[in-house]
Image: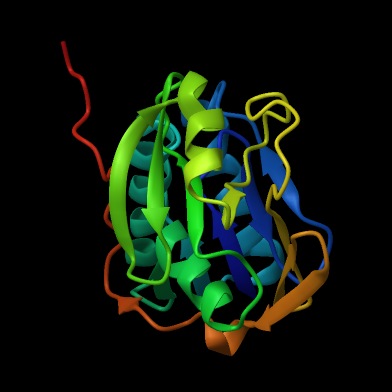
């Protein structure tokens, strides 16, 4: 089974050729391992494309640990490909499907990142309540996919994506897709948690 696993959101998505499975963050440390083993026994996981980006540090720690452990227990017979949201959005930008600038959610409820997708750089961290000012400054802008639909209020140009039949579909607002082969660009032996920001351990 070739799986696409999105660990970049509060509601983790496991996609394969059939219907996706979503797992809430609550109880992920208890239920995740059981679900992964269940899927592997039924379908045989051979390849994982992981969208790795900070939404919750617990999600990242637990998921990366579980996936690496599963690979070890299967004698390394799982191939991992790692991609971050900025890398994913840059691919979509180069296909002329999304605007150049994006407001990206980074796990902190009151702060977001303004990124230049073309240059793949962070412009600045801004307060969520100052987004309207940024929209006036950058007319060509999109908003990150966030499962909490109310987070960006009624913002236009919200991204929405899903993985079906080895294709990643993006709606913004027209539905386009990328083939899986266009996304498997970073082969890694081990999945490292992509925190992007320093965890607050105080």
Task: Name the quadrant containing residue 58.
Answer: top left
Residue 9 % position (x, y)? 55, 40
Residue 99 % position (x, y)? 58, 64
Above or below, comparing residue 133 to residue 68 in the picture: above
Residue at the (81%, 59%) spot, across then down: 173
Q: Is residue 176 left or right of residue 133?
A: right
Residue 27 % position (x, y)? 55, 23
State the residue in front, 109 or 103.
103
Does residue 46 show up?
Answer: no
Q: Residue furthest front?
A: 136
State the residue in front, 189 or 82.
82
Above or below, comparing residue 162 to residue 114 in the picture: below
Q: How is the image coloured?
A: rainbow
Quadrant holding the N terminus: bottom right
Above or below, comparing residue 65 to residue 151 in the picture: below
Q: Residue furthest bottom?
A: 181
Does residue 184 show up?
Answer: yes
Residue at the (47%, 82%) spot, across then down: 184
Residue at the (34%, 58%) spot, across then down: 68
State the residue in front, 103 or 40.
103
Quadrant holding the C terminus: top left
Task: Name the quadrant containing residue 126.
Answer: top left
Residue 107 % position (x, y)? 42, 31
């Amino acid at each position: 089974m070739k799986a696409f696993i999105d660990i970049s959101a509060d509601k983790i998505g496991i996609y394969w050729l059939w219907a996706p499975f979503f797992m809430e963050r609550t109880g992920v440390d208890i239920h995740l391992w059981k679900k992964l083993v269940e899927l592997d026994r039924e379908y045989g996981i051979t390849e994982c494309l992981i969208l790795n980006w900070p939404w919750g540090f617990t999600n990242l720690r637990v998921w990366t640990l579980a996936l690496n452990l599963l690979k070890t227990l299967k004698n390394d017979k799982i191939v991992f490909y790692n991609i971050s949201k900025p890398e994913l959005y840059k691919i979509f930008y180069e296909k002329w499907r999304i605007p150049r600038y994006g407001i990206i959610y980074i796990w902190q409820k009151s702060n977001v990142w303004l990124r230049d997708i073309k240059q793949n750089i962070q412009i600045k961290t801004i307060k969520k309540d100052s987004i309207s000012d940024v929209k006036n400054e950058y007319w060509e802008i999109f908003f990150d996919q966030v499962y909490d639909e109310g987070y960006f209020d009624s913002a236009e140009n919200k991204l929405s994506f899903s993985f079906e039949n080895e294709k990643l579909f993006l709606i913004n607002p027209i539905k386009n897709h990328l083939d899986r082969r266009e996304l498997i660009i970073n082969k890694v032996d081990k999945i490292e948690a992509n925190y992007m920001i320093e965890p607050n351990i105080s």
